[in-house]
Amino acid sequence: MIAFVKGILDMVEEDRIVIENQGMGMEILVPGSILPELPQVGNEVKIYTYMHVREDVMQLFGFRTRDEKEMFKLLITVNGVGPKGALGILSVMDVDTLRFAILSDDAKSISKAPGIGNKTASKVILELRDKCRLEDMLDTPPETADALTGSASAAPDKEVRNDAIQALVALGYSGTEASRAVRAVSVTPDMTVEELLKQSLKTIG
């Protein structure tokens, strides 16, 4: 199993990249959402990978974070969602947005992914609801945490964020819209739910 690939970014296409590592070019299928996060061709990059093997094909799928890779692995356990379908879902929404869509029964947002209809989106919600927890959302990923000082102010108040998301949903916004709006706001340690809600509404408006 190849856990990750680190090397020089040699090529970037719409759904795949090539990384040069020890004289070999490794083609990796990736969600379109990570393309803006990649460095320029010629620079070093690290991609977390999952190898999918069938009798007639061997493919390497790549992600910018371990969290994204783990969500991909969950998605392909859903009946009717193959690796390309899972990649399509992660191309139209990030991991936290997908978690909230699952927890808020937002099949409409999930079905916007290419090749994923409303029936399959409903299966994703049904089969993964118990595997996705709201408290997992908005955590600082390990890759980012390594670069921080470790101070308490570095970690946003999840309870305040979650309350604000719930308030936006109560106002009629979808779970996906609410999650995206709240995460667009920089939360300070003394920020109240009401203040965060006001700032979040500005990002929507």
Image (tube, helix red, strand yellow):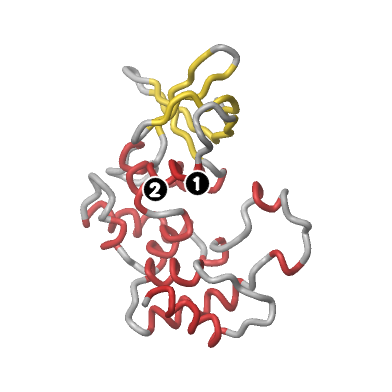
Q: Position of residue 6 (x, y in %)?
A: 60, 28
Q: Quadrant of residue 149?
A: bottom right
At mark 1, the secondary structure is helix
Q: Which of the two residues, 39 or 72, is positioned nearer the viewer here?
A: 39
Point 52% across, 13% down: residue: 24
The percent position of residue 194, horizontal first and vertical second, equals: 53, 87
- For disc 2, the marked residue is 90
For this view, does 162 lie left or right of residue 116?
A: right
Q: Secondary structure at mark 2?
A: helix
In this view, 142 is above or below 140: above
Q: Are marks 1 and 2 in contact (CB under 8 Å)?
A: yes
- Residue sitting farthest toward the top: 23
Q: Give residue 42's quadrant in the image.
A: top right
Q: Distance from label 1 to label 2 (Cα)? A: 8 Å
Above or below, 196 against 132 in this view is below
Q: Which residue is mark 1?
A: 68
Three-letter amino acid code at disc 1? Glu
In the rendered image, residue 133, in percent from the top left (x then y), is placed at 51, 63
Q: Earlier in the sequence, mark 1 or mark 2?
A: 1
Q: Position of residue 165 (x, y in %)?
A: 47, 76
Mark number, residue 89: none
Q: In which quadrant will I find the N terminus?
A: top right
Whether residue 191 is situated above or below residue 82 in the rendered picture: below
- Residue at 59% x, 25% y is 7
